[in-house]
Amino acid sequence: MKNFSTLDKTASAVILFCTALIGLVVFLGTQAGVRVKANLPERGLIGPYQVVTLIFSESVDPQMAESLFDIQPKIDGTFRWADSQTMQFASLQPFELGTAYKLTLRSGLLSQNDHELKTDQSWEMHVREPEIAYLKSGDGQSGVWTMSLNNTNPPRQLTDPSLKVIDFDASRDGEFVIFIVQNQAGGIDLWRATRDGVSSILLDCGLDRCTSPSISPDGTRVAYSREIAGPSIDLPYGSPRIWMLDMSEAKDGPVYQDQQVLGYHPQWSPDGMQLASYDGLADQIRLLNVDSGQQFIFQSQTGGPMTWSPDGTKFLFTDVEQSEGGVRTRVRMADLTINKTFTLTGSEDDMDYGYNSLAWSPEDDESVLLGMRAGGDDPSQVFWLFNPGRLDGVIVAGQPEYAYTSPHWDVWGGAFVFQQFKLKGPYKPEIGLWKQGSAEPLVVGEGLMPRWLP
Amino acid sequence: MFSVQTTNSSKRLSRPLVVAVIIIVLILVASSMLPIIFFTWLWDRLNIFATVFLGIFVEAVPYLLLGTLASGLVEMFLDRDQMSRWISHRPIPAAVTGALMGMVFPVCECGVVPLTRRLFHKGLPLSAGVAFLLAAPVLNPIVILSTAAAFGWKAMLLWRVGLSLVIAVVVGLVFSVEKDASNVLRPVLDMAHDHHHEESKSFVEKIRAAFVITADEFFEMGRYLIVGALLAAGLQTFIPQSALLTIGSGPVLSVLVMLGLAILLSICSTVDAFVALGFVGTFSFGSVLSFLVFGPMVDIKSIIMYAQVFKKRSVAYLVLIPFVMSLLSGIIFNYLSP
């Protein structure tokens, strides 16, 4: 011991004491079993398609963990594992508004080496009130704002006020929006803003124009239309092509390798497996299965709109045809289960109704909104709630001298928001809301491009 | 006799030459037997090595310069009497004051070593100097702001500052039991300046002298920074992060992996919060916190630099005590909040 100074002894004692404490903590921790925490928003207020994340204190067996998982009331969903400690549950249907969900992980074995969850762990979840995101322009500014339906909170701006937003899309889980902004080089970039209002650039497109962003239902990818800048400033942009940005893997590239395949206005199927886009040069709607690479092509001269059935097996689009009575806009249905396309309505119309909006309810196979001309010489436009099975419907928004466009259903299919303009008088874009069971739609505010922010 | 000596001398000269030629020939023969892919791999590794080395070195050099500049200014403008007045010689107040001094000096782990050495020379108590050495890289305003920028003014920042302070004070107190600083510190050449001679200098002369000291010390400590950066780059090149990350799960192992990464990466504390942010999601709160607490105190380049100021055993304690304390705190956090 002669060689050891007081410092040596003290330092060794501290190191030994800490080592003993580490041993004690590990022992106590092991006795406590596996711990788990749920990664939920504050106060358990979730979006209707919230991915519920459970984080375990150590690696667990996925099958064992899934067998202990329970949600009441029951809701179907799928499990994903980000890593051996992180389990995610994604529901296949939206969580219901006004329902209290109880998420429980029951006690039991969680790994092959007998590590277990000692006691049941539970969390309460409620679906938050959906909001409406919209574009508000004026005084040289243009930003994405959001408003609550019951006016509990004043409208708030989601995007950075210094950014002039051109277009945007909202994610299905309501956690973020993707928007586009012109950059200083003259190109158009993709940006992202969280629900809390934090903006950050997502993709610097340089001189290129990246437009029409469309977020995949699982929120991991953004399909967009990209026009490549010419070799010099005075040369025109190339034709638009569809590109895809994978945000989870930070990969970006054209969807179609063939440079002759053009496209804009990409649109995802509800399951995120298929991506539709319009090729204006070939007058085609092109459908791509993003997993298998299988493609379908549908002739259309209108360039849109298109909409998917709730189960993603059918979709509607518009086309024009020359009939005996003149040009008719018709609504066509593509049934992917039988590989057939047929005209749903329009061919027999006594006049051209110019169907300009299509929105299939995400929950009801028998509810499709058709935006169309009112009839006669009236330039007004109306919304027709159309049943594709019975081929009839009712007008749900049809005030004279108004034009209604861009309907978007909420995730439950119980309401839709839309854009409306008065055809006479000063330009004043308004946001309308229609709820199931209501006789008349409501005007909820002024703004452009309304979307749901669930 | 004379001719024999000449013969011996020529033998001594020729042996190393022969050995060198043999080695070169063996390398060439071995190289010709290796597949070309090996050289591609080696070239890639060397490129990575050079990039990592330059990354660490360029990141650290300004802070080393700042530290040596502070050291020069301390030498010329602070005298022993002032130091004695400001710093208590009782262990606990000295250690706490030393740790809190870090809030004043914007130095990271490279710059803090020459500054601490200078402060020791000016009579700073051992406990205060050690606490300052370990705390300053975290408690300085730049690091606090960069951590806040990465993690917000939230728990991670508070725990990082709090734990660093506690560990620095504890290690400072451990060193306070040693009454003779010469048992802990290495003797330093060329530090003795005539106190009275400094007093008689004008302000401009003092500034000039401070710059001379800064330059001398910068080049002296810079050598060790280069050695440390080379070593860190070598380890990073040949022990990829992915190898560590793949084994990094569980409440204990994940902390050990992050502590290993902290030593291996040798990132300057002014920017390490942004690197740590990348580990959030992959690693638990406790693991990332241990990285942020331990990394600024101990990494490869700082160990090399500590070895120029402290004796070997003291360096071992400066590494081991923060290591076990960071490990302990990381594990406790992991068990309390997975």
Image (spheres, rainbow, N blue to C red):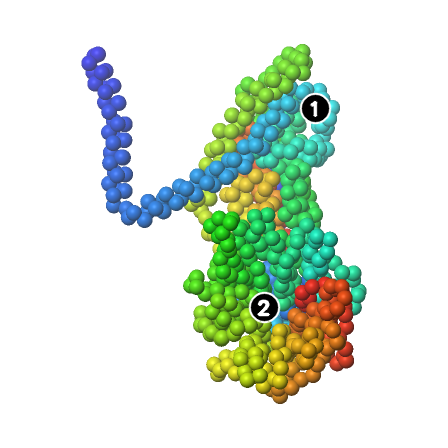
Q: Is residue B112 left or right of residue A100?
A: left
| Viewport quadrant of the C terminus of chain A | bottom right
User: Where is residue A396 drawn, in percent x and y?
Assistant: 72, 79
**Any mark on residue A198, and which?**
none
User: Where is residue A154 drawn, in percent x and y?
Assistant: 78, 61
Q: Nearer the viewer, residue A19 or B283?
A: B283
**Any mark on residue B83, and which?**
1
Q: Residue B207 is drawn in which quadrant? A: top right
Can I make out residue B290 in this image? no
Secondary structure of the residue carrying numbered label 1: helix
Picture layout, residue A161 above or below residue A271: above
Residue name at image x 58 percent, y 74 percent = A307
Q: Which of B121 and A160 is in front in this view?
A: A160
Residue name at image x 61 percent, y 84 percent = A349
Disc 1 and disc 2 on one polypeptide chain:
no
Can I make out residue B185 in this image? yes
Mark 1: few/some/many CA within 10 Å (<14, 14-19, 20+): some
Q: Residue B21 is drawn in which quadrant? A: top left
Residue name at image x 58 percent, y 35 percent = B109
Tag 2: residue type?
Answer: Pro
**Any mark on residue A217, and which?**
2
